[in-house]
Amino acid sequence: MLFQSSLRKELSRSFGATFVVLFTIVVTMMLIRTLRLAAKGSVNPSEVFLVLSYTSLGYLPTILSLCLFIAIVGTLSRMYTESEMVIWFSAGQGLGAFVRPLFQFAWPILILIAALSLVGWPWANSQTQSMRDRYQARGDIDRVAPGEFQESPGRNRVFFIDKDTADGTTANNIFISEVEKDTQIVTSAQTGRIENMDNSRYLMLRNGQRLERPLDKSELQISEFGVYGARLGANSKGGGNVAPNDRPRVRPTMDLLRDPTPANLGQFGWRVGMLLAAINFVVLALTVTSVNPRVGRSANMLFATFAFVIYYNLLNLGENWVAAGQFQPGTYLLILHGGVLVGALLWLAKRHNNWSLLKFSRPRRPETIAEAAT
């Protein structure tokens, strides 16, 4: 049918253009955030591209939902502005006739959103968290970069080296400051080398000085050494074990149902809610779009963005409420998504049938009543 095919073609063009713009913006923002994390030492600089890819994959359900909403609002707004909607209405196509072609266009996107929310989102989060945990679990020496002060994970030790060799086992001008048993220890050496002895790694310092001062500053002890060895902790390069992560966002969807804690149920409701929200956005876009040709489409687009932000924030807020035990997940899904769907359908029926309060409350004329009686 010409009506449905022309509508789907324009929706496809609008959705594609919107997706390219929004995805580029999100990727740029995620790149800046990932580079900031890498600069702080939370992400391995060599894995920035992988972290960016997994993070972008996790945000795809939200991006697709917003693109679908904006594409429908933008297409219908243009049809109102150019009086094309008047032509379709005159041809007998009411507002309710748009529901079927809109969902015919949207159903592949809805399936993709469901797959990404239920499978892609936890998998991407688990991959990102696993890389961050492995990077954080590396040894203190592995954290050291020439010319930079590096802090240990326990925040009780600071390292600094002037320069190192290509193999990363020898360094010059070494400075180590640590706090151990209420004593501040400052060690400096001209050179240092990592050596393996008795299945352990040792940092062998040469030609240095060691300063020990209790935190109460009662005394100060200074000693010089020719060779000083310190045993190092475990190294992630040798395949260090990273503790399993029980965060709800990284757990598979079926695991959330097998362990129905409030936090897991809240995350499960959020994942299912992304699909329900995308379905509601299709109905909402058709319902709220109404443009005065003399005004333009800016107000509609602004309202669409504002509605999406409110809906998405309520989705996140609902997850927190369920995790805190204030709501059951079924009640939260029914109130938020069911309420929005019912309200949108009632509004759509009102516009489709031209219902108004004045029409029902206006008293009938006496002559009309008399004519009806006869």
Image: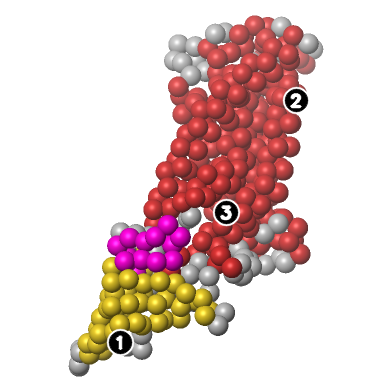
Q: Please identify the quarter of the rendering in which residue 251 is found.
A: bottom right
Q: What secondary structure is found at the residue carrying circle 2? A: helix
Question: For the N terminus, which image quadrant?
Answer: top right
Residue that carries the numbered disc 1 in the rendered image: 183
The reply to whether dot 3 and dot 2 touch (C-beta < 8 Å) is: no
Q: Give how far across and how far down residue 44 sits, in percent.
A: 48, 55
Q: Please identify the quarter of the rendering in which residue 329 is found.
A: bottom right
Q: Which residues are magenta?
A: 159-172
Q: Which mark is residue 128?
A: 3
Q: Is residue 166 magenta?
A: yes
The label nearer to you, 3 versus 2, is 3
Kind of residue at disc 3: Thr
Residue that carries the numbered disc 2 in the rendered image: 104
Q: Residues within 10 Å of mark 1 (few under 14, many from 20)?
A: some
Question: For the C terminus, which image quadrant?
Answer: top right
Kind of residue at disc 2: Gln
Q: Residues within 10 Å of mark 2 (few under 14, many from 20)?
A: few
